[in-house]
Image: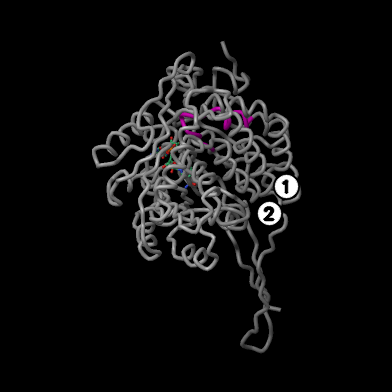
Amino acid sequence: MANENTPAVTDTILNFIGGAYRRGSTGKTFDNFAPATGLRIGTVHEASEADVADAVASAKAALNGPWGKMNTAERVKLISAVATEIERRADDFLAAEVADTGKPRHVASHIDIPRGAANFRMFADVISTTPTESFATATPDGGKALNYVVRKPKGVIAVICPWNFPLLLMTWKVGPALACGNTVVVKPSEETPRTAALLGEVMNAVGMPEGVYNVVHGFGAGSAGEFLTSNPDIDAITFTGETGTGQAIMQKAAVGVRDISFELGGKNPAVVFADADLDKVVEGLSRSVFLNTGQVCLGTERVYVERPVFDELVKRMTVAATAFKPGATGDPAYLGPLISAEHQEKVLGYYARAVAEGATVVTGGGVPAISGDEAGGFYVEPTLWTGLAHDSSVMREEIFGPCCGVIPFDSEDEVIGLANDTDYGLCATIWTENLSRAHRVAASMQVGVCWVNCWFLRDLRTAFGGSGHSGIGREGGVHSLEFYTETENVCVKL
Ligand code: NAD
């Protein structure tokens, strides 16, 4: 029988409120599954509306406690200590993330966990080094005034996260929110509650004042997610997830005119010109299509290839796709499972629909044959299609699986039109050795992020976000400071 201080990474996953682990007040729980095996591995204690209210009240109280009285240097010291403690406990975070997601250990150990720490360290630097603006102003009486800006925390921030990079995407928001002096209530995905819960231990270990970081577990509508976004003491909401969920959250945010930052879905194009270095393309594309089993918001699901190299690229991508080994846990070529049985069903639905929409299945298209412990895992085959119409639903809707449609094009103007013909606008990738074309086409992409001859190369100081249905606002570097602070202009008549 677990007690209130049970460490988060066991089969019992608790809420973290006011610096202490606790069950939900109504005793409700839900199951936590390992996607790699399909087996139940834990029990998550769901937060009730009263628990969420407690978490928000703790976060609000912390603003007026020791945390609210700290200067930037003191806060930065604590936030940097969080980064160091995540690194010290990297094995625990790795175990938690791999259990929840089934992703390959080498992916979590190279991307998820180090980025989790970097998100704290980087924003500790940004808040320490970013100046605020000031203007010397000539006044009508011939004198002068001095205008300068004071940054202040917004207050209590609701942080609502998805399951694909649980620690990375959560700390991407918690890091800057805390650096700016806010307090947070995090609602991790119901699929991946472990690393958010484990971070509570880190906060206590470094001496973070109670109530600064809170975690409530549960679902969206009618559960912790909605309780959080409806709570009037939430001052701003930062959300990463599906576009439809963003719309629901936006309606809640409208009550009380709360600020939002949304990082939403995508249907990202890659554009491959005939002059591209095909070795680099195949290396980059096979990551952008298959990394994390295609469950990457920045992943490529539409590939447009200039006709002279179309056949060659399809041939080489087929070799790359078939090198992945779904279900082979521990193998360097391991392609992990999808997050859940429900998501597996959704992706397989698109696999069937692609055929119905006239696709030629170049490789994959089904469920791999797997025996042993992983037989019950939520695996699908890495899949490539040709022959799909640009306006087919498979080429327009976000699938979030290890698959893409490949379509030929004949001119630069044509491919710019194809790439931009989408409701989404998260990112695009361009492959060409022609420098002028690279800049020209990059500037014409209607997206928040455009990569040229690379993919997912991230500098955390740069603006990140999407246009259209892919999001509202930008985070990263000073852009995060814009969202997580209120700026007050002070005008002094000299
Ligand atoms: P999701 O929208 O289903 O869930 C995200 C979070 O929102 C979960 O914690 C969920 O419980 C919560 N939620 C759901 N309904 C809610 C409601 N009504 N009120 C409050 N909270 C609610 O998304 P997901 O399936 O977890 O993640 C996959 C999606 O996330 C994909 O669309 C992907 O493109 C997107 N994503 C975007 C980015 C980006 O940076 N743009 C990054 C990663 C993932």
Ligand 1 sits in quadrant: top left
The one of 206 and 462 positioned closer to us in this rendering: 462
Q: Which residue is mark 1?
A: 76
The image shows residue 71, relative to residue 295, as above or below, that is below
Percent x, y of residue 284: 53, 46
> In the rendered structure, which amino acid carries the disc numbered 1?
Val
Q: Label 1: few (<14), some or many (≥20) within 10 Å?
A: many
Q: Report the Cα–Cα distance between label 2 and label 1.
A: 8 Å
Marks 2 and 1 close (CB-CB < 8 Å): yes
Residue found at x 53% / y 57%: 452
Magenta-drawn stretch contains 20: no
Is ligand 1 less than 8 Å from the beta carbon at label 2?
Answer: no
Quarter of the figure that contains the N terminus? top right
Residue found at x 40% / y 48%: 311
Percent x, y of residue 420: 38, 59
Is residue 146 visible in the rendered structure shown here? Answer: yes
The residue segment tinted magenta is 186-200
The one of 363 and 470 positioned closer to us in this rendering: 363
The one of 453 and 214 positioned closer to us in this rendering: 453
Taking 458 as reference, is 393 left or right?
left
Percent x, y of residue 218: 45, 29
The image shows residue 122, relative to residue 273, as above or below, that is above
Magenta-drawn stretch contains 191: yes
Secondary structure of the residue carrying numbered label 1? helix
Percent x, y of residue 443: 48, 65
Q: Which residue is mark 2?
A: 127
